[in-house]
Image (cartoon, helix red, strand yellow):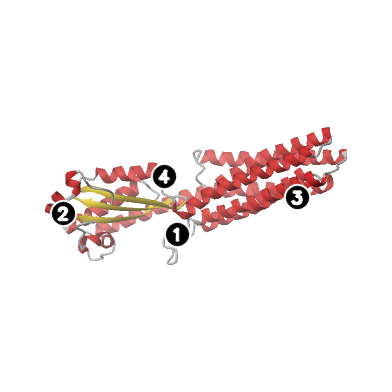
């Protein structure tokens, strides 16, 4: 930006690093307030994670039991739809392990190698879960459906009955797991921003629908004697799993790349900056999610002319504290502050309404 002096370009770096400043007591209080706020956020996040961890463990236990039952029933009944559902449950079980790893690793504190923390681990493991759903669930279901169409499948009445009983039990177990996940969503105010919880809800909802499709396909096969019904159910389950995997993977990818904070938070920050009497203009505002409940904020601002160095520094401190108070997830805040001379301010394009974006 034009007119940026070397003194004021370093204002933000100096704000928190000079131990011999005359307002050292104020800075100490500022740091204590930030530490208290960070501690409160960690406690709140820890409680939320504990609830989510219970939800994931319930889903894992249900899927492990169901996977074994479906696999045994599918082999005995030679049912492609049931075997597809067994693959679905195995994929879900592996995904729950990924999500447990995400919950544990994403809360590690920042260190020298990762100065912004490990919050994005949550998004990485959620991406692996999406890949698991696609490969282990969707692809195997397509394989079973195509094999049944090309080779056919013969079942006895006892096989149909055993398969339907297994699917009925699976429906109840998956339904109970889904209810637990929805209860956790309500406990978090109806939000699905946690990728671990979002994945569990998607998995359990897909599982309930998949079991329903498998039951319909098996029942129609039993009534008509046409394997095409059960094969179609297996293909439908595969298509459903691929769609869910795509949606979950796309969301995780966006967050890993560096997704901006939600528009509401960004709007509040921008409005706060514009409301400061010392700010002449907001040249640029950038935000990026660094975790489930943490974000980085960076802004380039022009101050009104005529402010001395001490005043500029005080303004920067106050603005950063205001942003942290207004948007608690703003864990890292960086300001590029410019205090332009009065003559330059009068001659700049902004004074004549011609300023473009920075």
Q: 24 or 251, which lies in front?
A: 251
Q: Are marks 1 and 2 in contact (CB under 8 Å)?
A: no
Question: Where's residue 284, x and y in %?
Answer: 30, 50
Name the residue at 31% across, 45% down. 270
Q: 237 or 32, which lies in front?
A: 237
Q: Earlier in the sequence, mark 2 or mark 4?
A: 4
Q: Crowdedness of circle 3 by 10 Å Cα count: few (<14), some, many (20+)?
A: some
Q: Earlier in the sequence, mark 1 or mark 3?
A: 3
Q: Earlier in the sequence, mark 3 or mark 2?
A: 3
Mark 2, residue position = 307
Q: Earlier in the sequence, mark 1 or mark 2?
A: 1
Q: Are marks 4 and 3 in contact (CB under 8 Å)?
A: no
Rendered image: mark on residue 117: 1
Dividing the picture into quadrants, the one containing residue 264 is: top left
The CA span between labels 4 and 3 is 42 Å
Name the residue at 20% across, 43% down. 353
Name the residue at 65% across, 49% down. 92
Q: Crowdedness of circle 2 by 10 Å Cα count: few (<14), some, many (20+)?
A: some
Q: Crowdedness of circle 4 by 10 Å Cα count: few (<14), some, many (20+)?
A: few
Dot in front, 4 or 1? 4
Rendered image: mark on residue 68: 3
Mark 4, residue position = 262
Question: Where's residue 183, x and y in %?
Answer: 57, 39
- In the picture as drawn, the residue positioned furthest to the left comes out as 343
Q: Earlier in the sequence, mark 4 or mark 1?
A: 1
Q: Earlier in the sequence, mark 4 or mark 3?
A: 3
């Amino acid at each position: 930006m034009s007119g940026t002096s070397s003194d004021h370009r370093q204002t933000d770096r100096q704000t928190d690093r000079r131990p011999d400043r005359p307002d050292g007591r104020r800075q100490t209080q500022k740091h204590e307030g930030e530490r208290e706020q960070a501690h409160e956020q960690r406690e709140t996040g820890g409680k939320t994670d504990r609830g989510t961890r219970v939800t994931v463990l319930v889903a894992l236990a249900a899927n492990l039991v169901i996977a074994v039952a479906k696999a045994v029933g599918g082999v005995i009944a030679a049912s492609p739809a049931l075997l597809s559902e067994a693959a679905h449950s195995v994929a879900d079980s592996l995904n729950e392990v990924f999500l447990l790893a995400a919950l544990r690793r994403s809360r590690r504190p920042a260190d020298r190698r990762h100065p912004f923390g490990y919050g994005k681990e949550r998004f990485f493991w959620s991406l692996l879960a999406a890949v698991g759903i696609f490969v282990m669930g969707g692809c195997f279901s397509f394989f079973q459906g195509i094999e049944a169409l090309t080779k056919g499948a013969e079942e006895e009445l006892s096989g149909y009955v055993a398969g339907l009983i297994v699917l009925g039990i699976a429906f109840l177990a998956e339904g109970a797991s889904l209810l637990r996940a929805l209860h956790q969503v309500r406990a978090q105010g109806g939000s699905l921003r946690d990728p671990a919880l979002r994945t569990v809800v998607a998995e359990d909802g897909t599982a309930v629908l998949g079991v329903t499709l498998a039951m319909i396909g098996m029942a129609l096969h039993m009534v008509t004697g046409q394997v095409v019904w059960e094969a179609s159910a297996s293909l439908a389950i595969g298509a459903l799993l691929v769609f869910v995997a795509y949606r979950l993977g796309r969301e995780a990818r966006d967050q890993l790349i560096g997704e901006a904070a939600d528009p509401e938070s960004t709007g509040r920050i921008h409005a706060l900056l514009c409301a400061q009497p010392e700010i002449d203009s907001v040249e640029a505002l950038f935000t990026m999610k660094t975790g489930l409940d943490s974000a980085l904020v960076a802004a380039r601002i022009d101050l009104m002319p005529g402010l001395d160095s001490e005043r500029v520094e005080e303004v920067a401190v106050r603005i950063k504290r205001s942003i942290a108070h207004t948007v608690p997830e703003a864990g890292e805040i960086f300001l590029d502050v410019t205090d332009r001379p009065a003559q330059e301010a009068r001659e700049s394009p902004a004074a004549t309404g011609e300023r473009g974006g920075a």
